[in-house]
Amino acid sequence: MAHLVGPGLIGAAGPTSQTWTTPFPHKPGDKARDKFGNEYVFVEFITTNVSGGVLVQIDATYRAFPLLGTARVGGRVGVAMTGATAATDGGWVQIYGVHLAVQSTGAADSDALSSDQTVDYILRPQTSVTTPSGTLGMVLSEANTSIEASTNYTPIYGMWLVPDTEVSNIPDAFWTDLYSGTTSPVSAVSNTSGPVTLTTATTNGTSMHTGNARPVFLNYPYVTGIDVETPMVNATT
């Protein structure tokens, strides 16, 4: 996992795959960046069911817990970089940049990084409490001809999928360097043909994910907990 450089001359505890018990090396809310420009915030996890690669919601005092659409509450969102084995563990959450292995859920996500990313997916919180909690949900834009045919969803703002063509062109060194020092989700890399293939893991702590994975852009994502109508494709009215 990425090693942090900290803000300015301040050293940052890392790597991001590490979990800490109290006393923490940082106070919750401290931020740091890695050499790729990805930004992280240090949080206190308040549940034990957090694993690396899941989405978490961050409250006003920088406590983090799995993001679920059923909560219906707005707040800041990030990707947990490590797992929590106790309700008082601390660790890093990514809030800006590119994350290559966000855990996803649902049949539509089973082809993790292949050509189905040519369609328009909208990212949303997980809609039901399953294991692991905080997996990324997606909904398709609809080819409707009437506004009455659209459905509602709760979006994640400031987060979107990395297109498949870009994933295939990511240099090998980017993957291997970003995940150095921990269990890598990368089992094969092809820069010129086909999508990247990811492995799976099943435990918290140093593992990166437990299921299907999606690469995403992060721009300080957040949720409002308010439903909106699914955008329509080729709508005529």
Image: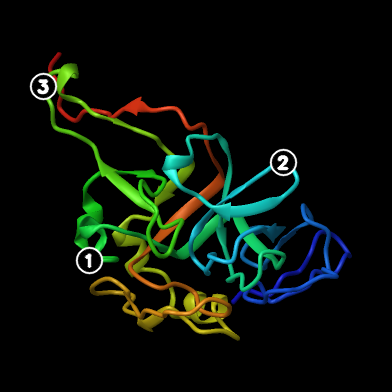
Image coords of residue 130 (percent x, y): 37, 59
Mark nearer the N terminus (3 vs 2): 2
Task: Give the spatial CA distance, label 1 vs label 3.
Answer: 29 Å
Image coords of residue 94 (percent x, y): 60, 58
Q: In the shown orientation, is residue 68 left or right of residue 29?
A: left
55 to 192, vertically: above or below: above
Q: How many marks on residues? A: 3
Q: Residues within 10 Å of mark 3 (few under 14, many from 20)?
A: some
Q: Nearer the viewer, residue 190 or 182?
A: 182
- Check disc 1 and give the amino acid type: Asp
Q: Residue at x 48, y 82 (%)?
A: 184
Q: Residue furthest right?
A: 9
Q: Secondary structure at mark 3?
A: loop
Q: Nearer the viewer, residue 126 or 102?
A: 126
> Can you identify the residue that label 3 sits on?
145
- Check disc 2 and give the amino acid type: Ala
Question: Comparing marks 1 and 2, which lies closer to the viewer?
Answer: 2
Mark nearer the N terminus (1 vs 3): 1
> Can you identify the residue that label 2 sits on?
60
Q: Residue at x 28, y 74 (%)?
A: 192
Within the image, what quadrant is residue 167 found in? bottom left
Image coords of residue 134 (percent x, y): 46, 56
Task: Work out which quarter of the rendered image holds the N terminus and state it.
Answer: bottom right
Q: Which mark is residue 163?
A: none
Q: Residue at x 36, y 68 (%)?
A: 169
Q: Which mark is residue 111?
A: 1
Q: Secondary structure at mark 2?
A: loop
- Check disc 3 and give the amino acid type: Thr
